[in-house]
Structure formats: structure tokens, C-alpha cells
Amino acid sequence: MGDAELEYTIVFPDLTDSGFKEDPVIILLGWGGCKDKHLAKYSYIYKNQGCIVLRYTAPWRQIFFPGIFSKSLQCTARKLLDVVFDIGIEDHPILFHVFSNGGCMLYRHIVEIQYNKTETYLSKLNVVGTIFDSTPGNRNLQGSITALYAVLDSSTNVFVKCIAIPTFVLIVLLKILLYPITQFVSLSFYDALKVDPSRWPQLFLYSKADKIISYKDIEAMIKIRKLLNIQVQSVDFNTSQHVNHFREFPEKYSTKCISFLKECIRQTPLTRLFDKRNF
């Protein structure tokens, strides 16, 4: 389901009594090239616990070519937040579950919009936490090319592949070379997450075996967020590949996600109010 400009899916729980005061809202942000059927598998983790689940994946062009489609990604973030208000679930406990750099890049814009002082109505959003799956990664050219190849599968037009991949490589190289200067105008999404103004709890799910996103980038981000006195948890699955932790360790993965959600919801309203006033 969705509107003419934003294709999203929302599912509501079957349970009449979930044990929560209000049904939690889980916003799943998919990785580059992710299909809704892939995100649907994660929906069941939360739906079976009485949660409302909103699923969305940004178009791969916005993810892999953010320098060209950056405004589009910002607009997408705003539209997604508007969906939450249109449905009337902004007061429910909201948890973001983001996958890979594709979901994380969109999440970055969502947080920036929410903490924009001119967007006062967004202060009504009751965000209680974020789960990062296989993200964030920092300027990994080889991993990025591998991810783009996976998106441009056998069904993709050969001409599109011949144009997209060299263009992508050139853009990434230029961004790396020019970043010492351009960072004063616009931070990379990784550096933006370092100074992310949100202070709600965060859970990082990753693996040292991941060939797309370096575990060192994720562990570096974990240390940075902990230094800000944020409640940070992490699980290293050790052997699973990129965004494959749930498939290889379904019980462990599901249990951790649900326990983290419940911990986030137990956070007092006073703590969330303090968060929004001071950042």
C-alpha cells in the first residue's frame, strides 16, 4: 500500500492484547535494492508481538547517487514522517529498524528533520530507539561496488549497468578526495551520525564476516555514541554475512530485537522530554 509518490507497506497486529499500553510502531528502512517481500520477513518478528509495522525502502538511485538525488532523499524522509502523522500513530512508541547504509542514509535525514527547530510539530513523535542492522559503514569503495552489483541484477538493462557502475565509482572517488573541503558544507552520512542529536537507545547488529560493511566502522560508531552517554547495545554474530543475521540466527536475532524494544518502551516519558529539550 502507499500513495502515488511513496510506496510503503503498513501492517497491523492481529493480537487484541499485546501487553503494551499502546501498540508500538516499528519503521523498517530497507537496504539498497531490498524488496518488500524481504522486509516482510522482519515484520513477523514485531507483528506477532502486537506491533504496527511500517515498511519502506528508498529507490536505489537515491541511495547510491545521493550527491545527485540528495534532495529527493530528504523529501522522501519528510514524506515518510508525514505518513506517520496521516495515519495518526505519532504518539505511539516508535522504533526505527534500519538496514545497511541504504536504510541508514534515509534514517540520517529523518533524524535531522525531526530535530530541525522550525519543524515544531515533529516534536510530537514518540521515538524510543533505533536498531542498526549491518550499518553504518564509512567510505568503503569495494563494499559499495559489491552492493551496487547486487542491486543491478541480471534483469537490469546492460546499458544502465555500463553507465551506473563507472559513474558511481567516479562519484565515490571524487567525494573521498574532496571531502576534506566539502565536509564544511555537508557532512558525509557517517560523520553526520557521529553528531546525531538523538539520545534514545541504540542497538547495533553486525558481523565480523560482513564483506560489504566493515565491522570496524560499526564498532567505531558504537564507541562514539557511548561517549555521549547513550544507552548502546551491540551483538556481533561473527559468521553471518551482510543483512543475513536474521536468516542465519533467527531465534537469537528475534529475541534480541524484542527484548531491546521492551527495554526502550520502559524508558520514562521524562527522559524522552529531557532528550528533546536539550538537543
Image (spheres, rainbow, N blue to C red):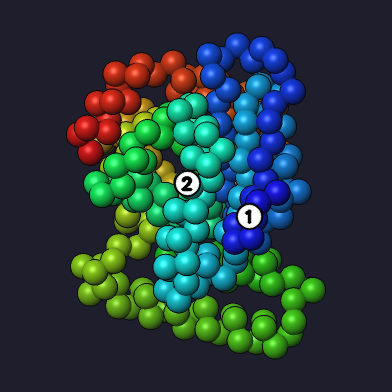
Q: What residue type is labelled 2?
A: Leu
Give the residue type that dot 1 points to. Asp
Query: Is 39 displayed left or right of 108 in the figure?
Result: right
**Is residue 235 shown left or right of residue 52?**
left
Q: Check disc 2 and report the residue beneath it.
A: 81
Q: Which residue is drawn at 79% across and 74% down?
A: 155
Q: Nearer the viewer, residue 275 or 224?
A: 275
Relative horizontal placement of residue 190, taking residue 44 as reference (left or right): left
Q: Is mark 2 on a helix, strand or loop?
A: helix
Q: Percent x, y for residue 265?
A: 46, 20
Q: Residue at x 47, y 33 (%)?
A: 90
- Image point 45% across, 79% down: which residue? 171
Relative side of 254 to 216, left or right: right
Residue that carries the numbered disc 1 in the rendered image: 3
Q: Which mark is residue 223?
A: none
On the image, the x and y values in percent for residue 129 come to 44, 32
Q: In this view, does 236 lie above or below 256?
A: below
Residue 207 percent location from the top left of the image: 56, 44
> Which residue is drawn at the image coordinates 36% and 73% (left, top)?
176
**Residue 231 placed where, x, y %?**
36, 28
Location of residue 190 with respect to 250 vertically, above or below? below
Query: Does any portion of residue 244 appear in the rendered image?
Result: no
Nearest to the observer: residue 172 or residue 118: 118
Q: 185 or 169, which lies in front?
A: 185
